Structure formats: structure tokens, C-alpha cells
Image (cartoon, rainbow, N blue to C red):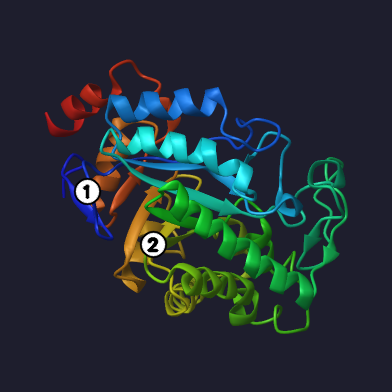
Amino acid sequence: MSLFETFKIGNKRAKNRILVPPYQDDMAQRDGKVSHTIFEHLMRLVREGAGVVVFNSAYVTRQGKSSPFQLGIAEEDHLAGLKNLVTHIKAEGVITGIRLSHAGAKTSERVCGEQPIGPSSINFGKDFDLSRPFDEDDVEELCLFYAHAIERAEEAGFDFVELNGAQQQLLDQCLHPRHNNREDRFGGKLENRLRLATMLVKAMKERIKNRLMVGYFFSIHDKLEDGFNAKHLKSMIKILEDAGVDMFHPITIHVMNKFFDSEETLLEWVSKFTEKSIIVEGNIKSTQVLKEVLAIDKATMYGIDKALFARPNWYQFLQKKISG
């Protein structure tokens, strides 16, 4: 599999497998609209050769806003800027996605306008406020927020969305046994800790059918100490697939790190348990690391670190180093 070959994602064709992942989530205007900084940053990378772009994590409701300058997809006012940028990016022949996010407990009333919600009462530190455990009414609202968000994503012209199940955001908090001590249908066994995620996926799929692919961005390295193992990963992927997830985006501290006391990377483990598309990411800062992960030959798209994108003529540099 070549990094530079075209491939299909859903019913769209990307010009190569180079993916620009979100790097920081505080580049938008204060009201969540697309900023000149975001526009110029992404347009530079697509004009220089990227095949796929995932927009910054976008909050689906102000309640889930994690930082003052986070991108938003929560209101109709957010649409114009998103649509304009997507239109310009797609004119370059590039596939576009957006990460849908809810901060859960990892925010403050100052930022999100109310007491944060989480799976349990959580306080991430002095910059955050103690969360209240979400209730059934909150869950119903969350399903609507995500359903409306994917509708806006479709209207803006995105080719896919991915749910943020990492970065200590709400869905990650639900999965982590240290943050989720509930005793109802959202806590305890793995299926319950993933229940909110599956409900959101189903709500989104029901709203737009199969017109947009739905991905799932997740991390597990911080859960290994609590006993998360290969069987849990296999079950997690099956549960999410059954709910309607179309592709997986595992993030690791380093893409070549080995998992579960084996000689295999997380990419290799995930590929054992699914035939869906996989986005691989995790400190791909050099062509040597990129060559190593390409040799595994299990990923569909390769999320490259900003250090490589910062090089002048980075696309030609990659072509020379990878293909030459």
C-alpha cells in the first residue's frame, strides 16, 4: 500500500493517504466560528498535498465547550464559516471530516456557562469545576445535540465525522473506570461504560442514515493500569461496530509502542478485530517512523505530526524519502 495512492473512503475518493489531524482546539473565534487562523492553516496543508483533513474538535453544545476559542458546530451561526472552508478544501480534491466533541467534566462554568456534566462527580484540577453526574434527561439532550451536529456537518459538506472518545473528554470519561463509578446502565461493565457512545452513534445514524461515515477516535493507554486488555479492545470495537461506527481512529503516545505484553502495536491489534477503515496516529514526526508504520500495512490513513508538515516542501520531501 502506497502513502501516495488514491483510495476510497465511503463513496468518495481521496488523492492520497496523508491525513491532517486536529492539532489544537483553541484556534477559532471566541464564539466558535471558523477563524482566519484555521482557514489559512488548513488551506496551506491541502494546497501542499494533504489528501484528508480532520477539522479541530468542535463542541456540539456550549455545555460541552472545553476552551474559550474552541471550534463550534453547535449553532446555525457556525455553519457559514464551516461551509466556506469545506468548499475551499474540497475544491482542492481533499476529503474532509470533523471531530465532534463534548468536554464532559473537563471544562468550567466560566467556559461552558453552567456546571459541567460527567459520568460521575469529577474535578480535573484548578482550571476546571466539579461536574455533576449526567441523568437520563441529559442523555436525551446529548443524543439531540449530536444528531443536530451531524446534520450541520452534512449541510456544511463534510464527508465524515468522528466522535471524540479520547483526550479525557466526555466519552473517554465514561469509558475510564477511574472517572466512571456509576451503578446504573452507564457504569460498571464495558458495555455500560460505552452505552452513551453507542446511543450517540445510533442517534446520528438515524438522523442522516448512511449519507456520512461515522468514525470513533479513542485512546486506551491511560486505562492499561486499570486492567484494560486485548479482550476489552475486541469487545469495545464490536460494540461500537454494532452501533454503526464505520471507521476507527486509535491514538497512542507513539505509534510504534507495543501493547498488551506483546510485540504488536495498537494498530495491529485494532486491525485484528475490525475490517473497517483505520486512521493511525501517534507521534509520526519522522520519515523513519512513517516508514515503520507503513510497513505494518494495516492502516487506511496516516495522521502525520505537525513537525513533518512544518518542513518546507514537506510533500516533496515525503515523496523523496518514502518513495525514492
* Residue 175 in view: no
The residue lying at 78 percent from left, 74 percent from top is 137
Image position, residue 73 (x, y; %): 59, 48
Mark 2 crowd level (few <14, some 14–19, many ≥20, 10 Å Cα): many
The residue lying at 52 percent from left, 50 percent from top is 99
User: Given this view, does label 1 or label 2 mark the residue nearer the observer?
Assistant: 2
Q: How far apart are labels 1 and 2 at the CA level?
A: 27 Å
> Which residue is nearer to you in this view: 234 or 303?
303
Q: Work out which quarter of the rendered image holds the C terminus and state it.
A: top left
Residue designated by label 2:
213
Give the residue type that dot 2 points to: Met
Residue 144 has which mark?
A: none
Of all residues, the one furthest to the left in this rendering is 324
Residue designated by label 1:
295
Q: Is 185 situated above or below 244? A: below
Image position, residue 138 (x, y; %): 76, 70
Pointer 1 and pointer 2: residues touching (CB < 8 Å)? no
Q: Is 19 situated above or below 103? A: above
Q: What element carries label 2?
A: strand
